[in-house]
Image: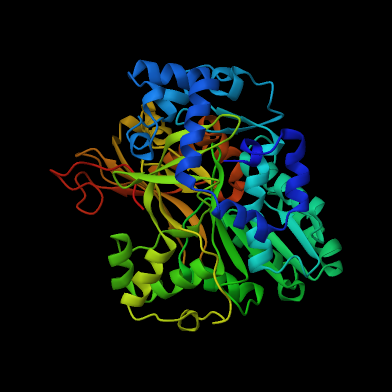
Amino acid sequence: MSNSLTHPSGDIFHHFIATPMDTLLADHQAVNPEDKVLALFHRCAAEVPAYRRFLEARGVNPAEINTFQSFQKLPLMGKTDYMQAYPLPERCLGGSLKGSDRVAVSSGSTGQPTFWPRSAAYELDIAVRFEQVLCDSFRAHERSTLAVVCFALGNWVGGLYTTSCCWHLARKGYPLMVATPGNNKAEIFRVVREMAPHFEQTVLLGYPPFVKDVVDAGAAEDIDWAGYSPKLVFAGEVFSEEWRSLMGQRIGSKSPCHDSASLYGTADGGVLGNETPFSIAIRRWLSVHPDAARALFGESRLPTLVQYDPASRFFETHEGTLVVSGENSVPLVRYHIADKGGVLGFDEMWDFLRDHGVQSLSELGLNKDKQPRNLPFVYVFGRADFTVSYYGANIYPENITVVLEQPEIMVWATGKFVLETRETEAGDHYLHIAVELLPDIEPDAAMTPVIAESVRAQLLRLNSEFANYTPAERQLPRITLCSFADPEYFPAGVKHRYTRR
């Protein structure tokens, strides 16, 4: 929750600019996050008309919610039963858009966007997440830094939100210049060639597969990335530590825990957490100790692992998925974000590491004298609602179903498919769709381009994130035609899943 709970609105920017990050985080740690989230609930019950109606419809009397234990029993709010059920102004503090000065959008399964208004004041808490990365990982308070925003610009949350937060940090006194070429590789290269030689380091911020495209294409155009001391900031996708190492090699990185960082962000909540050198070191250790990873996360695959500030964004879990609360123009109170994951306390993480033989930071490859920030962890496997993330765009099964319902394709296909993202040996991502054919239809090479082109056309029509985030040369999916009841993708007698990760 933002400083607006304790500072008059006119003082928020001055407080952020005048207060060192260490002090901001220490002030937050002095607050009981459970008390703060309970106060947010009561403010929303009083000041947000939609939330008041939401509670009334479920028989909740706000006056009876006076302990954290009772808060934990409140109904979860979601996109369908809350965000899409009440008019936008009624979901805002004060029941009006009056306090908001900007808006972001996110795509829904039909391409109908959800709008997320906010004010610049609410970006300040989020700017601290960027400050942690730039300061703790990249030492940007000591080095002149060129930040190149490679997220799509426009109403999409990644580009302008990132830009605005970086501008806040520049205003705070960081020797930081922010360039905004967006996801236009030619413009990115033009910025890098002209501006990067004047700075001690260059930071590329974007979706992982796109940043890789930028690095590879730039190298092919004779950009000497290593000469610019590059750093990488990612968001929107889970990637492997092998992939991080590959990217480190491409940019000449010698310190994988300090030269890149991933953000966990959503359009509705902003940046909810960020990788730190400590969380990266833990993840890299877990990547070579799969039994320990399975013991910690319940799966051998690695989720994104970040640290978060519970006084800014408060996490709970529900049936293996994440629930978040936080103040914003549209406040979130036990909002179910449908991401599969969990939370771990700082001491809980250290206890786990010691139980598995890690006794010091040096055993994780970090400087033993550097004390990690005492912040809890949240881990994220990805969406639990069957979406697939590709270049930061959420792709829904419904987007593909429309394709297989086209008359010229229905004569070949059952309508069942499996949607997934894959990675080439070179680390490039691509969209793959396995399509089940009717029992009497044999695979024919002529079918593949028809289906692939139709998928691209429908995604461009229905999914505004796909249209704006995914480079044109990466939009055509690869199609595998499978015989009826194919045992790998469409086994008989098993409940079908339309996505695979």
Residue 337 coordinates in the image, percent (x, y): 43, 39
How many numbered discs, if any?
0
Residue shown at 28% from the left, 60% from the top: 298
Give residue 201's quadrant in the image: bottom right
Question: Percent from the top left, x then y, of residue 306?
Answer: 49, 59
Of 255 and 29, nearer the camera is: 29
Q: Is residue 477 left or right of residue 60?
A: right
Q: Is residue 355 above or below residue 389?
A: below
- Say whether residue 339 is visible: yes
Residue 496, position as x, y percentages in the image: 23, 42
Residue 458 visible, this angle:
no
What colour-coding does the image apply? Answer: rainbow
Horizontal side of residue 352 vs 20, given as left or right: left
Query: What's the residue at 43%, 57% (across, down)?
Result: 422
Query: Residue at position x 65%, y 21% from top?
Result: 97
Query: Picture quarter containing residue 448?
Result: top left
Relative depth, front residue between 246 and 77: 77
Residue 355: image location, x then y, percent: 31, 76
The quarter holding residue 285 reads bottom left
* Quadrant in the picture for the N terminus: top right
